[in-house]
Image (cartoon, grey):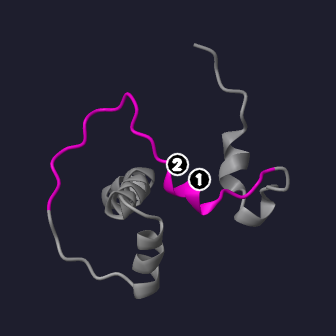
């Protein structure tokens, strides 16, 4: 296996302001809403129905995206959880 040539320490030390996004176009609301794809991934485990209080403007924005807004909210939360799961485990082990 080839070793990465990326300087991950430098990447980790970067702040948001240091990242040059000038060559990237901003994703439209439609692109963002459809950005999460589960192709070739494990099936989603069962879901649990809950009551959740959201800011009205947040809920209205998701509803305005059309059918499937609850699925989109769930997908966004799942991505956030997956991205932060290792950080939570690191904090607990300290």
Give the magenta range: 24-48
> Residue drawn at (64%, 21%), measured in percent from left and top?
3
* Residue 43 vertical placement versus 33 (above, below): above
State the image coordinates of residue 55 (x, y, percent, origin top left): 40, 85
> Residue drawn at (34%, 54%), measured in percent from left and top?
89
Nearer the observer, 35 or 3 = 35
Classify the position of the C terminus by image quarter: bottom left
Q: Bin the neighbour count of mark 2 within 10 Å (Cα to Cα): few under 14, some 14-19, many 20 and up.
A: few
Cα distance, mark 1 to mark 2?
A: 6 Å
* Residue 34 vertical placement versus 69 (above, below): above
State the image coordinates of residue 18 (x, y, percent, origin top left): 79, 60
> Residue drawn at (71%, 34%), measured in percent from left and top?
6
Q: Bin the neighbour count of mark 1 within 10 Å (Cα to Cα): few under 14, some 14-19, many 20 and up.
A: few
Could you say which disc has been placed on residue 22 in the image? none
Residue furthest right in the image = 22
State the image coordinates of residue 47 (x, y, percent, origin top left): 17, 54
Q: Kindly state the secondary structure of the residue where label 1 is placed.
A: helix
Classify the position of the N terminus by image quarter: top right
Nearer the observer, 2 or 26 = 26
Residue with the mark numbered 1: 31
């Amino acid at each position: 296996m080839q070793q990465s040539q990326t300087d991950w320490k430098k990447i980790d030390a970067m702040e948001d302001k240091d990242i040059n996004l000038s060559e990237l176009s901003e994703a439209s609301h439609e692109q963002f809403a459809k950005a999460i794809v589960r192709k070739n991934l494990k099936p989603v485990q069962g879901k649990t129905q809950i009551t959740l209080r959201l800011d009205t403007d947040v809920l209205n924005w998701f509803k305005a995206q059309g059918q499937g807004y609850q699925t989109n909210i769930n997908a966004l939360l799942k991505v956030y959880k997956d991205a932060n799961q290792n950080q939570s485990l690191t904090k607990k082990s300290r």
